[in-house]
Image (spheres, rainbow, N blue to C red):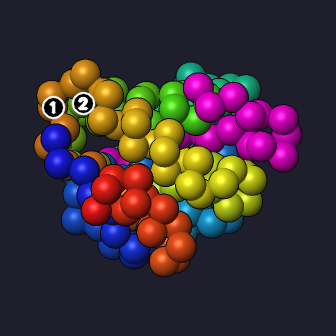
Amino acid sequence: MRIEAVEGDITTESVDAIVNAANSQLMGGGGVDGAIHAAAGPTLLHECRRLRAARWHDGLPVGEAVATGAGELEAQWVIHTVGPNRHRGQTDPDLLASCFRRSLEVAEEVGARTIAFPAISAGVYGWDAAEVAAIAVDTVRSHPGHEVDLVRFVLFGAPVAQHFRETLGA
C-alpha cells in the first residue's frame, strides 16, 4: 500500500472513496463535512437520511464508519466516520484510530482501491494535528488488508500537511 500526504481539497480528489469527517447525525455540517456535502450535491444528503433512518436512528457512533454513494463528486463512494471530540471528553486515541481502521475496512467492503482521508478530529474537535498524524499513519501502516493500493491524506493547510509528511518520513 502506498501512503502519501498532500495539501489540498479532498472534494476534488480522483480516488475511489473519500472519507468524510462526519457528525453523528450524517446531516452535513461545517469543515470537511460541509464541504463534502456541498460538493456532492443533494443526493448525498438524501442517502445519508435514508441510511440513518434504516440503521443509525441514534446517529453513527464515534469510531464507526459507513459508505454512501458520492453524488456529484469524482469519487465513487463517501465513507462517513465520526471522530472523537476532545472538547466533549473523547480523548481515547483508540477511538480516533478506529475511525481510520473502520474506514479502511469499509473501503475494502465496497471494493475501493484508492482512498483519501482528511485529518479526522483535528481542528474544531480539538485534537492536535501532530497527534492525529501519528495515530492515522500508524493505523494505516498496521492495517492487515491488502485491497487498498493507495491511501492519500488530503490536508487543509500547510501546517497540518507538514505534520503528516513528517510522520510519514517524507
Figure quadrant of the C terminus: bottom left
Q: Is residue 159 magenta?
A: no
Count of labels in the image: 2
Whether 71 is drawn above or below 127: the answer is below
Q: Residue at x 40, y 36 (%)?
A: 138
Amino acid identity at mark 2? Glu
- Give how far apart the Cα atoms at labels 2 and 1 are: 6 Å
Residue for badge 2: 108
Q: Would you say 50 lies left or right of 73 here? A: right
**Most extreme residue toward the right, as rendered?**
88
Q: Residue at x 48, y 62 (%)?
A: 163
Q: Is residue 93 magenta?
A: yes
Q: Residue 149, position in %: x, y?
A: 14, 43
Q: Residue at x 32, y 28 (%)?
A: 142
Residue for badge 1: 147
- The secondary element bearing badge 1 is classed as loop
- The secondary element bearing badge 2 is classed as helix
Amino acid identity at mark 1? Glu
Q: Residue 44, position in %: x, y?
A: 47, 54
Q: Which residues are magenta?
A: 72-94
Q: Residue 71, position in %: x, y?
A: 37, 59
Q: Quadrant of residue 91?
A: top right
Tell which of 111 and 120 is nearer to you. Answer: 120
